[in-house]
Image (cartoon, rainbow, N blue to C red):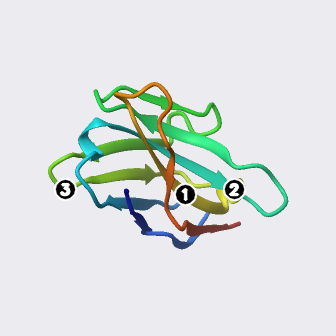
Amino acid sequence: QVQLVESGGGLVQAGGSLRLSCAASGSIFSISDMTWYRQVPGKQRDLVATITSGGSTNYADSVKGRFTISRDNAKNTVYLQMNSLKPEDTAVYYCNARRSDVPLPVPFWGQGTQVTVSS
């Protein structure tokens, strides 16, 4: 079992920055692919950024060049640095973990953290 706890959300003006953190319990963090998703009410949960257990990254087109995902395996934590924020980035941001060493990994989710960007 893995528990994920997100933090760092809040209210920021357009053009500002926030850094989200996701702290993971358990011993599988280093072999897990970590992903940030976001969701607004009434819409599906969308992928924002992924970092694999090997450190490769992938971003949604809407955040490329503005957001950076990183991980610290020693701290069992994944980060999402968000710069040049826009009102359309407003959402609840969720952290997701999936083991990278099994074919059908069980996904684990955090409780989410609200990000609100005012215009």
Q: Few, some or many C-alpha atoms within 10 Å of disc 2 (few <14, some 14-19, many ≥20)? A: some
Q: In the displayed structure, would residue 82 be above or below residue 110? A: above
Q: Give residue 94's mark.
A: 1
Is 113 in front, or is 68?
113
Q: In the displayed structure, would residue 76 be above or below residue 28? A: below
Residue beneath disc 2: 39
Q: CA distance from mark 1 to mark 3?
A: 19 Å
Q: CA distance from mark 1 to mark 2?
A: 8 Å
**Amino acid at the residue labelled 1:** Tyr
Residue at the spot 42% in from the left edge and 69% down from the top edge: 7
Identify the mark nearer the N-term, 1 or 3: 3
Q: Are marks 1 and 2 in contact (CB under 8 Å)?
A: yes
Q: Quadrant of residue 41?
A: bottom right
Question: Residue 69, percent across and down?
Answer: 40, 42
Q: Few, some or many C-alpha atoms within 10 Å of disc 1 (few <14, some 14-19, many ≥20)? A: many
**Amino acid at the residue labelled 2:** Gln
Indicate the secondary structure of the residue bearing disc 1.
strand
